[in-house]
Image: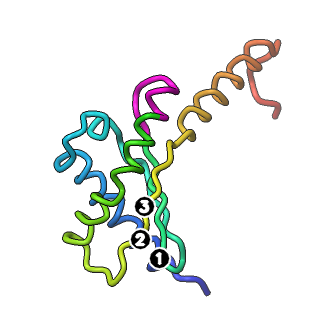
Amino acid sequence: MPKDFSRSSRVAEVIQREVAYILQQEMNDPRASAVTITHATVTRDMSSARIYFIMQGDEDDVKATEKVLNKASGFIRHELSTRVELRHIPKLIFTYDQSIERGIRIGKLIEDVMKDEPDNSWPG
């Protein structure tokens, strides 16, 4: 029977919270403070963590910010090591979270389909 909360998911929660704090309070780059951390995943062996973020801006801004965050991952990792008690701090990989945009796009598609239907009620 699997555990409700594995160690990697608990570590991911802590890393998410601490990385968000570091980006807001410790980084001097305004691009880094403009992001919101949505979630984090940690590999089972705790060797790497993928940090998902969202932000306002066009695709070029997102790519530039993702590059800045990945370049600053060493600094962020060092800051994490002073805040989190782990033997090994995972390698940090920042990725733009497209799930919100995808959800909005799917919602609009559903609305368009529902407008075209003669009867907007569900069959039943």
Disc 3: which residue: 92
Q: Is residue 21 left or right of residue 6?
A: left
Q: Identify the residue shown where x is 48% and y is 23%.
A: 58
Mark 2 vs 1, N-terminal side: 1
Disc 2: which residue: 90
- Mark 1 crowd level (few <14, some 14–19, many ≥20, 10 Å Cα): some
The span from disc 1 to disc 3 (Cα, nearest Å) is 11 Å
User: Amino acid type of disc 1?
Assistant: Met
Q: Is 37 placed above or below 108 here?
A: below
The span from disc 2 to disc 3 (Cα, nearest Å) is 6 Å
Label 2–label 1 contact, CB within 8 A: yes
**Element under disc 3:** strand
Q: Identify the residue shown where x is 81% and y is 34%.
A: 124
Residue 12 in the image, given as x and y percentages of width and height: 41, 66
Label 2–label 3 contact, CB within 8 A: yes
Q: Identify the residue shown where x is 26% and y is 79%.
A: 85
Q: Is 34 placed above or below 79 here?
A: above
Disc 1: which residue: 46
Mark 1 vs 3, N-terminal side: 1
Range of the magenta residues?
Answer: 54-63
**Element under disc 1:** loop
Residue 25 in the image, given as x and y percentages of width and height: 17, 47
Task: Please identify the quadrant where the N terminus is shown.
Answer: bottom right
Q: Nearer the viewer, mark 1 or mark 3?
A: 3
Residue 90 in the image, given as x and y percentages of width and height: 41, 71
User: Amino acid type of disc 2?
Assistant: Pro
